[in-house]
Amino acid sequence: MTQQPSAQALVPFVSVENMMRLVHQIGLERILIDLTDAIEEDFLRWDCFDKTPRVASHSDIGVIELMPTSDGLRYGFKYVNGHPKNTREGLQTVTAFGMLAEVATGYPLLLSEMTLLTALRTAATSAMATRHLAPGDATVMAMIGNGAQSEFQALALKAVNGIREVRLYDIDPEATRKCAANLAGSGLKVVPCSSPQEAIEGAQVITTCTADKQYATILTDNMVGAGVHINAIGGDCPGKTELHRDILHRAEIFVEYTPQTRIEGEIQQVAPDHPVTELCQVIAGKAQGRRDARQITLFDGVGFAIEDFSALRKIHDYVQDGKFCQNLDMIADPDNPRDLFGMLMRSK
Ligand SMILES: NC(=O)c1ccc[n+]([C@@H]2O[C@H](COP(=O)([O-])OP(=O)(O)OC[C@H]3O[C@@H](n4cnc5c(N)ncnc54)[C@H](O)[C@@H]3O)[C@@H](O)[C@H]2O)c1
């Protein structure tokens, strides 16, 4: 006889549909602000976390990664892929899901879609870096790469950093048209551009978020003027970068977790001891961020597990009233914890 699952068997699950409802209920810009603050709170308690470069399984055409961390009370991981050729086949470059669990018992607390959540947390992380590194009066950004992440990036910088104008460029004009249409009515002035040079004109912040499985050169040295802040988000795998290496020699470089960024970030193009500063140090006031108005600051963002942990714990808070999740019968829960076999046989 089949029994109803017990309370311990059930794990709250946030589906794509519920994630979309949740975002609309709270408001997209509000969530981006909340996630920026949640990530910053966790970067402030950096030492509480287990940290390891993510576990990556590479193929010629992409990567599949697991991103685990724990703060001692809760454990989280994300499964995420990166396949730049996917969009040509009608599939996304990046998809993800993840889980939060209780360290005390090892039992899951939450299972969630994370394709949307990754776009939100990646944008929130750029906003956090921009908050600490960009010139204080920045109002114009260039967004190079107008794919799935791009609107989220622009809106996070609007909501958190006061950006008013976004200048768009993509090698595929169709992507720029899509991004411009999606951002119409957002309150941002949107300027589609036909070259990266045109896009960065007058921009104090440049975000590169392109997808190509190679050493690409989205920005060359002569394109980057004094005083700008760059969020380089798209180079996030061995052999996959976006900036000419000369830019790295002119910029002050800020990273999430140095051992992972050395493998995956723009800094794979420079010496293994090239100086970098971890953002957590800047946020904690232990290292300097922007020094002066002429300095070029570079956030070499690759995406780190703590950002996903922050996003999952925030979603866990949001769904406490049960409105935006459903319960999955996920953990086998025998009456006698040592009689798993008996539970199986009694279900015949
Ligand atoms: N750092 C992070 O935390 C993080 C998180 C998510 C995604 N990413 C990375 O960000 C990148 C973008 O992700 P997405 O989901 O938006 O991908 P996407 O495929 O939806 O969009 C990428 C866009 O880049 C454009 N592009 C490619 N080469 C270009 C070039 N030379 N100049 C201008 N545009 C170019 C493509 O035409 C496409 O529109 C990927 O490389 C992904 O791995 C990083």
Image (cartoon, rainbow, N blue to C red):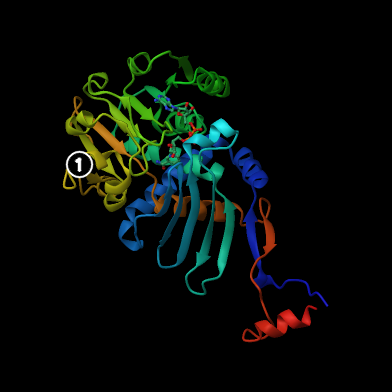
- Above or below 228: residue 149: below
| Quadrant placement of the N terminus | bottom right
Foreground of the two, 34 or 155: 155
Q: Which residue lies furthest to the front in this view?
A: 60
Task: Assign ligand 1 to one image quadrant.
Answer: top left
Is residue 34 visible from the viewing direction of this image?
A: no
Which residue in the protein does label 1 denote? 288
Q: Check disc 1: other Cα within 10 Å, few if <14, some if 14-19, many if 20+.
A: some
Q: Which residue lies furthest to the right in this view?
A: 1
Foreground of the two, 281 or 83: 83
**Residue 243 lies in quadrant:** top left
Q: What residue type is labelled 1?
A: Gln
In the picture, measured across the screen, residue 215 lies left or right of residue 248, that is right
- Above or below 138: residue 213: below
Is residue 307 visible from the viewing direction of this image?
A: yes
Q: Residue 13 placed where, x, y %?
A: 64, 56
**Residue 165 lies in quadrant:** top left
Q: Residue 337 placed where, x, y %?
A: 63, 84
| Quadrant placement of the C terminus | bottom right
In the picture, measured across the screen, residue 231 lies left or right of residue 67, that is left
User: What kind of element bears circle 1?
Assistant: loop
Q: Residue 43 placed where, x, y %?
A: 35, 51
- Above or below 132: residue 113: below
